[in-house]
Image: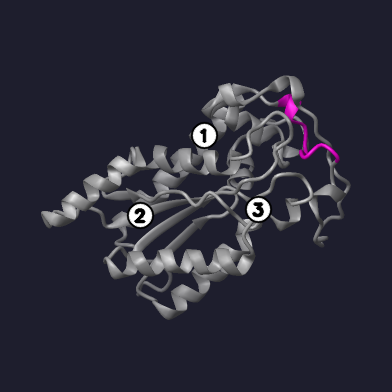
Amino acid sequence: MVASKLLELMRGCERRTFKFDKAILAVGATEYHGDHLPYGTDTIVARRLVEEVAKRINGLLVLPPIPYGMSLHYAKFPIAITLTSETLTKVLKDVFSSLFKHGIMKLLIINGHDGNIAPIEVATREFKVEHPEMNLCVLEAWWITAGKLLPKGTFEVWDGLGHAGESETSIMLAMNPELVDMKHTKGVVPELPSHVQIKWTFDELTPYGATGDPSKATRDKGEKVMKVLIDHVVSFIKEMDEKGWKYGILG
């Protein structure tokens, strides 16, 4: 589907009827998600959110997702396909530069993986300084945003958090239930200190390749997560369009 859309875009460029003024990009990862979820979960979720948002926003170009992320801290569970932070940062900046050259000055990134947060931050901050006219926006951790937007008590364990945990397993049940095997859900809530981050490797947190409690996941919870995230992002883009993508000091 993405390939056919890009072909349509290319033909549109030939006719000089380029109709996109902003783009949206999913950034995922390929790594172990316990025995109950597929390796590409992070990419599948981010890509689906991107596609659903695009259905409701005119002039929004859906870019092909980036399926590999910075997964070095998950690499003791086979088979993590990982980029270094430096490589991912460079890839992202090259994508930004390509859009910039074609006059697309508005980009929203939906990130599906915790290890991508720092490279995305570096890439967007540095590119913004180099090209202040570029608008770069990021939903950096949908799993945290969903927990803040949904009513308290939506999730049963650890506020739904966890790699392949309650929230992530739930959203996969809503998106692609055929790829979820609930018979193999195992997870653990790791003991971690508050307010100061320990930089862990994932094998220090769980023997299962999953944290949180995926056994508490349901399709209904996943549908709620999807709806609240899509509504939130759509509302953000529409508000920014209305404001002409102006923010900060407006006087």
Name the residue tied to disc 1: 226
Q: Position of residue 49 (x, y in %)?
A: 47, 40
Q: Quadrant of the C terminus?
A: bottom left
What residue type is disc 3 on? Answer: Asp
Q: Is residue 212 magenta?
A: yes
Residue nearest the observer in this picture, 120 or 91? 91
Name the residue tied to disc 3: 114
Camera-side mark, 3 or 1: 3
Between the residue at mark 3 and the residue at mark 1, the CA separation in whole angstroms equals 18 Å
Q: Position of residue 124 (x, y in %)?
A: 50, 68
Residue at 62% across, 50% down: 113
Name the residue tied to disc 2: 23
Residue 235 is left or right of residue 83, and the answer is left
Residue at 11% across, 54% down: 15
Residue 13 versus residue 179 in the image, above or below: below
Q: How is the image coloured?
A: one colour
**Bounds of the magenta span?**
207-216
Residue 173 versus residue 13 in the image, above or below: above
Residue 153 is left or right of residue 92, and the answer is right
| Rendered image quadrant of residue 242 | bottom left
Dot 3 alpha-carbon crowd within 10 angstroms: few under 14, some 14 to 19, many 20 or more:
some
Q: Earlier in the sequence, mark 1 or mark 2?
A: 2
Label 1 residue SS: helix
Residue farthest along the bottom direction in this orientation: 130
Residue nearest the observer in this picture, 100 or 29? 29
Label 2 residue SS: strand
Q: Position of residue 13 (x, y in %)?
A: 18, 56
Residue at 46% across, 74% down: 127
Q: Quadrant of the N terminus?
A: top left
| Rendered image quadrant of residue 160 | top right
